Image (cartoon, grey):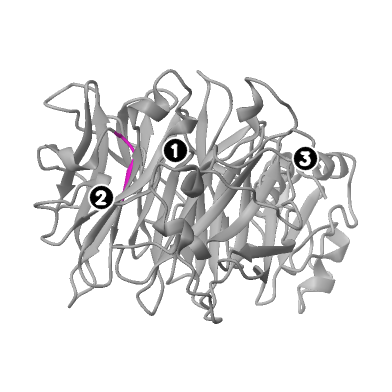
Amino acid sequence: MRYPPEGVRRLDRAFGRSVISRSTDQRVQLRLLSVRDWSSVRPGAPGRPRRRNSHILTTTTLQSAVFIRMSDASLLSIALALLLAEPCAAQWEPHQVEQLNGQADRITSPAKIQIVSRDWELGAVHYPYLVHLPDKNSLLLLVNWGEKPHNKAGVSMSHDAGRSWTKPRLVVDSWAVGLTSLGDGNLLLVSQKSVTGPSDTYHFSRDYGETWTESVAAPGYQGDKPFYEDSQFLVDRNSRTGEVSRLWATGKAPGKACLLRHTDDGGRTWSPLRYIPQWGRTGEIVLHRAGNGNLIAACRTNIPRFVDGKIDHWSGLGVSLSADNGKSWSDVGENILYAWGRHLSSLVTLPGGHIVLTYVVRQGYKDAADGLPQFGIEAVVSRDYGKSWDLDHRYLLAVWKGDRKGPNAWRASGQRTATVLLPDGSLVTAFGAWYRNIALVRWRTHDQQLTSDTTIADASWDSDARNLFAPKISRYAITDAE
């Protein structure tokens, strides 16, 4: 069901009996009752005088029923507000994740997938950021939509592990990035002056993303020089109290990439930016705290011989480590996962300490048999706190085929990944796909016996054996073209 348009039409022509009756797996119903029904739903008040043209809008959930009395004039706006807060129609569809297993047959695992933005009617939707709110067991998704210079950003909520989502609630009339949960309902995001432009304002929510009334200006580089951010903040917590002790941020400035800073007061004041030369030539660095205490920086690499003269989809992916809380870092060149074609990463630690790294495959897949390009979302696992990554047993979370050849074939590729761990041990990975929508995959890693093959990992980091791959997927992921 697509709404609000259909719901508006039904509400607009209605008076009296049921206007909107929607029973879904979320067990939500909206019903408009005339005055004569008031005594039947509110016991103990039969025959009580009623004001003419008064109506009651009821919202029934599993736990409770709420009755709101209103005049005809206010009926439409309140009903629409409730409708927009309801979950939209997109829901999980059957899917499968394939895992490479060296030279042996792939391991296929059941999964779920959905294009969450399909029913939002917002046009092109871009660049997702996803967080889990454990005390509510909810998910919050930041997305951007609209065409520049009229971009907008807002948040969508799921209370059922990603099965259904509210239509995004507007937060800012600009591009926004970096949605981060600080715990206890506190959230932070960054609005930017233009699409992927310099940071402008840090916005705070104290009520799980319902409102964003607090903000501070985002400090620039060396004063008022532009500072460009893209990644979520890394949140450190006090091991005894669980309170946030430090936030880490990365970014770039004109002529100066690979910058790092931190805040110890929740994002209001920041340390001076430090240049980290070991990260190479990049402005997109995702930070993560490993189970052994080390810091991990997943870096979007820009190696000149692969990216010069090409679009930025030829950037690669490498990892830099710090064992002294960010004072010093290993050289990303010592741990290049892919020389080109993979980036826009996200990291999450599993209960046993293994780290899952998800990323977009924009280049490196061989064309399909019909000559059309292929793109995907993959995941690799580290079992040694980020020192090495099991490339020979990586997961293919979603693979799809483009619809055109030639210089604009890249438009069907993905953008950004964001992965969170749910209480049941499953993972939800959000990513941007096609022209343009936001997709989600709910999946799991597993502990099945794997081969000892290390052919891909042993290949040179810049070789075709490492970077060029035929996905040979048994079933393409759903796309927004279907």
Identified by mark 2, the residue type is Glu
Coordinates of residue 441 in the picture (x, y in percent)? 62, 59
How dense is the environment of label 1, judged by Cα within 10 Å: few (below 14), some, or many (20 and up)? many
**Magenta highlight range:** 282-286
> Is residue 166 or residue 417 the one in the foreground?
417
Q: Residue drawn 27% across and 36% down?
A: 251
On screen, 290 above or below 462?
A: below
- Circle 3 sits in a helix, a strand or a loop, which is it? loop
Coordinates of residue 312 in the picture (x, y in percent)? 45, 28
In the picture, measured across the screen, residue 261 lies left or right of residue 377, that is left
Residue 60 is drawn in which quadrant?
Answer: bottom right
Q: Which mark is residue 122?
A: none
Residue 408 is drawn in which quadrant?
Answer: top right
Q: Residue drawn 28% across and 66% down?
A: 290
Instruction: Name the main secondary structure of what is drawn in magenta.
Output: loop
Q: Residue drawn 56% across and 81% down?
A: 448
Q: Residue drawn 69% across and 45% down?
A: 400
Residue of label 3: 369
State whether residue 102 appears in this view. Answer: yes
Q: Which mark is residue 334?
A: 2
Q: Which mark is residue 340?
A: 1
